[in-house]
Image: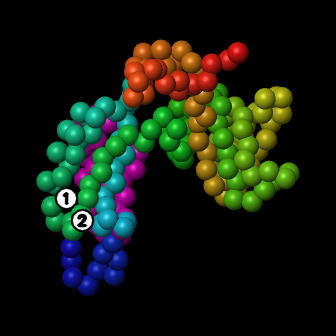
């Protein structure tokens, strides 16, 4: 990096994001986020990637191996590459399009009508507002600047665990993960 740069951290982030996007494009992935942050364990480059159908561990490994040599000029201690997860926050227009019609939770910075947490079907989102429809069919709109977080609600059913092997205790007895309804 050039001497005398007034914001070397900003330049480093820009450098990382540019290269992270290039590798994402090569692999046909979506670059969700690339950041450079100080953590208790040191300077960390954190990269979140996604693709249709989800990211695998092998995808993360191949991406990491391709990106790492491109970042040798940056001083960092750790580089993490991962999927943002199925409940990743909804931030962009693309995130909205993927989640339109799905149930989301909206957390507000300050309570409106006595509550900070709202749940409903994601109906609309633009630069200024986000709109959901609650379980009773009532529409609620919030200014984007009042919204701390929007994320999908992931509801799991018992059949989602059918292929998961049972855990056993020391005596070899199955351990129930989900309580059985009586």
Disc nearer the start of the sequence (1/2): 1
Number of other residues with Cα within 10 Å of mark 1, as a class: few under 14, some 14 to 19, many 20 or more: some
Quadrant of the drawing holding the N terminus:
bottom left
| Res. 71 mark | 1
Asked if disc 1 and disc 2 are in contact, CB closer than 8 Å, the reply is yes
Query: Can the viewer see residue 93 in this picture?
Result: no
x%, y% of residue 125? 65, 41
Q: Between residues 86 and 170, which one lies in front from this camera angle?
A: 170
x%, y% of residue 59? 26, 34
Q: Does residue 27 show up magenta in the picture?
A: yes
Q: Is residue 77 left or right of residue 133?
A: left
> Mark 2: which secondary structure?
loop
x%, y% of residue 42? 30, 67
Q: Which residue is mark 2?
A: 76
Q: Between residues 115 and 71, which one lies in front from this camera angle?
A: 115
Q: Which residues are magenta?
A: 10-38
- The answer to which quarter of the image holds residue 123 is top right
What residue is at 51 percent from the left and 19 percent from the top?
Answer: 160
Residue 112 position (above or below residue 60): below
What residue is at 17 percent from the left and 45 percent from the top?
Answer: 65
Residue 108 position (above or below residue 102): below
What residue is at 59 percent from the left and 36 percent from the top?
Answer: 152
């Amino acid at each position: 990096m050039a001497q005398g740069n007034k914001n070397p951290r900003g330049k480093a982030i820009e450098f990382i994001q540019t290269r992270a996007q290039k590798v994402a494009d090569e692999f046909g992935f979506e670059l969700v986020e690339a950041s450079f942050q100080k953590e208790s364990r040191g300077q960390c480059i954190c990269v979140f990637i996604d693709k249709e159908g989800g990211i695998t561990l092998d995808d993360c490994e191949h991406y990491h191996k391709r990106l790492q040599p491109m970042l040798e000029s940056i001083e960092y201690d750790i580089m993490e590459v991962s999927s943002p997860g199925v409940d990743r926050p909804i931030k962009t227009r693309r995130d909205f399009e993927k989640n339109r019609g799905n149930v989301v939770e909206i957390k507000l910075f300050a309570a409106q009508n006595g509550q900070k947490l709202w749940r409903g079907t994601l109906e609309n989102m633009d630069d200024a507002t986000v709109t959901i429809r609650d379980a009773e069919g009532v529409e609620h709109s919030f200014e984007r600047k009042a919204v701390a977080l929007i994320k999908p609600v992931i509801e799991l059913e018992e059949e989602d665990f059918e292929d998961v092997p049972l855990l056993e205790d020391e005596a070899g007895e199955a351990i129930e993960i989900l309580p059985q309804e009586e």
